[in-house]
Image (cartoon, grey):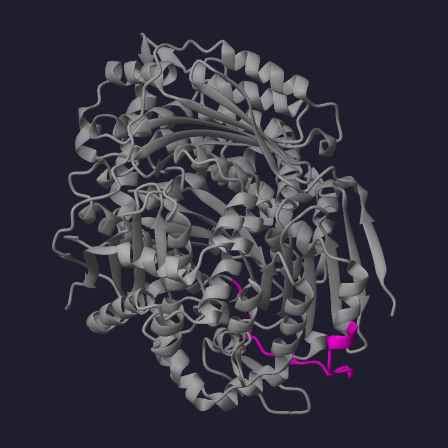
Amino acid sequence: MDYKSSEEKVDIIDSFNGIEVYKVMVDKFKTNSINIFFQDNLSKENATKNALVPAVLRRGTKKHKTFKDIALYLEELYGASFDCAVNKKGEYQLIQFYIDHVSDKYTGSDTNLFEDCTNLLLEVITEPLVENGAFKKDYLEQEKENLKKIIEGRMNDKVQYAVERCFEEMCKGEPFEIYENGSIEDLNKIQEADLFNHYKYILESLPMKVFISGDVDDSKIQSAIAKLKNLKRGNIKGLSQPIINKPKKDTNFVTEKLDVSQGKLSIGFRTNTASHDKDYYSLVVCNSILGGGIHSKLFQNVREKESLAYYAFSRLEKFKGLMMISCGIEVSNKDKAYNLILKQLEEIRQGNISDYEYDSSIKSIKTGLESLKDSQLAIVDFYLSQKISNTSDTLKSLYEKFEAVTRDEIVKASQKVEIDTVYFLSSENQ
Amino acid sequence: MEIKKIEYSKINEELFMYEHESGLKAFVIPKKGYSKKHAAFATYYGSVNNKFIAPYENDITSVPDGIAHFLEHKLFEQKDGSVMDKFSMTGASPNAYTSFTHTVYLFSCTDKFDENFDMLLDYVQNPYITEESVEKEKGIIGQEIRMYEDDPNWRAFFNLLGAFYKEHPVRIDIAGTVESISKINRDNLLKCYNTFYHPSNMVIVVVGDVDPEETLNKVAEGIKSTEHKPEIKRIFPESHKGINKDYVEQNLSVSIPIFQMGFKDELQGEKGFDSLKREVVIKLLLEMIVGRSSSLYNELYEEGLINSSFDSDYTIEEDYAFSMIGGESAEPLKVKNKILEEIKSLKSKGLDKKNFDRIRNAMRGRFIKQLNSVEKISHLFIPAYFKGSIMFDYFDVYDKITFEYANEVFLKHFDEDNFALSVIKPIKGD
């Protein structure tokens, strides 16, 4: 069991026609994966269409006409997994096409899975099943219905819903309020011809990032690149930068009622710090001390000392410069929890940070970074995020920066954080 | 001390094993080149063990629902504070979870493994429970229960178990209810601890880039008890043939009906390798009937009766087993009827051997993929061990199951008399 290295290494190996190709060399995994991302600005005009296109594409290609044909073929490829997704990072929307497969050495026969999987992924993207110059009508109608259900179904996961609703209320009028799967209103407007034109626009104009990960021979990577070079590309869209700093306004209070057992309190903040600012590293440590794990002030006080909640966390949305605190509580404890949460932030602002909180936070951040190396998808996501925020940190350089953060810098970062919106999901009978 | 090494050359893994004189077994699965080291200390005691005869006693002890999970929370408490804080100081992430049959204490870390491993061995063997801390925990666990009450997927699952089983404790939520945990106190917690936390009822699993000998030496030094304990008598209600009821519904705040349906399995007393065989073959049959490459999945999907949340699973333990098919649908009854029709028609037509072989290969590939993750290995290893198997044996199971065996299980398991459906419906006017 000899492995060449455990140090993940991500290199850009080619760049052409608005397509950047990255190679993630790790040989400890039993799988290889290919991830293709198209990046767009989040906009009301495109969000719903961007979410619908991959959903229709995954239904069938010229060669594998139905979902069943694709699923059968994936099974023949020793249980390869393929899917598409849309995500939101700050004010960008990402359309992701993903496939992974076991390494040929585990198939017990003469296989060439990397090539087969790459071909399938490109086939899905570039050779959709077309009828009368547009997507197959049935597929489009069914996927519109599915997307409608996904948009309506946001309320089903109350923990996530309370976080997303708070962000939405907070960023009204900014691109960030747009849901990554779009809106029902825009969905109803989409016509067949529209969507097919939009698909061609995605393929020709949106910046692409391709990540090939695993233990793949250079010759195979080169032939994959050759196929990418054949993509018909036009003018590549220039993407805008997110707006991080907003003038301070009065705190916005929103209450929504649903038939729930547990209330959910979400508090949204503006950090006024962008991910490429030098203050960003202090902000990350500040967030960890506040609510980034079991060592944090929120966990220790809201949960352990006062027994108000089972979960209470704070998270950064680094691309848009936001921070979100959320917890699940008895509806009647809303004010108590709210005051206790704000008190924790105030403690940091006053410089009340114990050695335990400071050390544990830095160490927990380090463990988190080191742990990324054990997941192919996490490595890809890390480097994709670096590219999106125009930073060029590696795991190692990042850790050195976090380790150098002083208490004074943490206090300074916390003082830049401003409360914006308080969202409470309450029960009907209150 | 004697250390046994087993090589699994087909999947490029190895396993080191040591048996302590108390009867506890400890395993190390080295993962060269991985950053994360994952250690778990688990006991064969979960939420279903609510009636038992403790060693050296004659009378049956009945304990409140949710006590195994409550004990899991309380073990973190130590004389000098919470052991979580000590883990935090090294940057480790400690955690624990309780299932129907077992409770697992774990940590993962990238640094200071020895120190963390000593702590894990120490705190799990030394409970420190005060009445005051028990009362404090009731608020926290109360909120955990509330959170799950609002989770429609969780509720659909437990309602289905309630439909399958009239009396078996598997029908009860792992955390119990707010009412049942009010009966938990220091005495009944310690009674459960003293009954089930003897090393002979436990296992230790370490996965990661560690030295197997050094790690197993630590186990030899760190386990306090050296005596074998007499067997614990676990009392389960008489198993009834058939089910409790075939339909159950509940209204929650959801956008679309969410369902779980499936077959209660009449067990033949399978243990060890046979239990794995049954698990794999029923999962394979489910793939053949409703998996993504099946005609039925595609028909249901194209008619808009299911979406990509549709999935199936099978669970088997010594005393209960069931299959489950779940998802979201505007018309769960239609989905049910189509599934039952398909099963009828397959029973008369016979299963297709080509499908069986192809899906078996795909499942083998998917199993190998899981070996990429230290958590996943630990997570699969523990339940397999308590069922009397080694997780890597799954790989042999794929070779050992025959088409004839699949047919035999197919006719027995998918019996309409044992079928039930659970639906979570939207609240009218929501």
**Residue B224 is one of the magenta-drawn residues:** yes
Boundaries of the magenta span: B220-241
**Residue B165 in view in this figure:** no
Q: Residue at x 32, y 27 (%)?
A: A40
Marker count (numbered) = 0
Left or right of residue B423, residue B318 in this image:
right
Rendered view: A412 above or below B200: above
Q: Residue at x 26, y 50 (%)?
A: A155
B324 and A19: which is toward the camera: A19
Left or right of residue A294, residue A412 in this image:
left
B339 and B37: which is toward the camera: B37
- Residue B386 placement (x, y as % from top left): 67, 65
User: In the current view of this chain or complex, which residue is farthest to the left?
Assistant: A250
**Residue B136 is one of the magenta-drawn residues:** no
Q: Main secondary structure of the magenta part?
A: loop
Rendered view: B391 above or below B354: below
Left or right of residue B422, residue A337 in this image:
left
**Residue B105 in view in this figure:** yes
- Residue A2 placement (x, y as % from top left): 79, 40
- Residue B79 placement (x, y as % from top left): 54, 86
A177 and A98: which is toward the camera: A177
Q: Residue at x 53, y 49 (%)?
A: A400
Q: Quadrant of residue A93?
A: top left
Q: Residue at x 66, y 57 (%)?
A: B381
Image quadrant in which the N terminus of chain A is located = top right
User: In the current view of this chain or complex, which residue is farthest to the right?
Assistant: B2
- Residue B376 placement (x, y as % from top left): 60, 52
Image quadrant in which the C terminus of chain A is located = bottom left
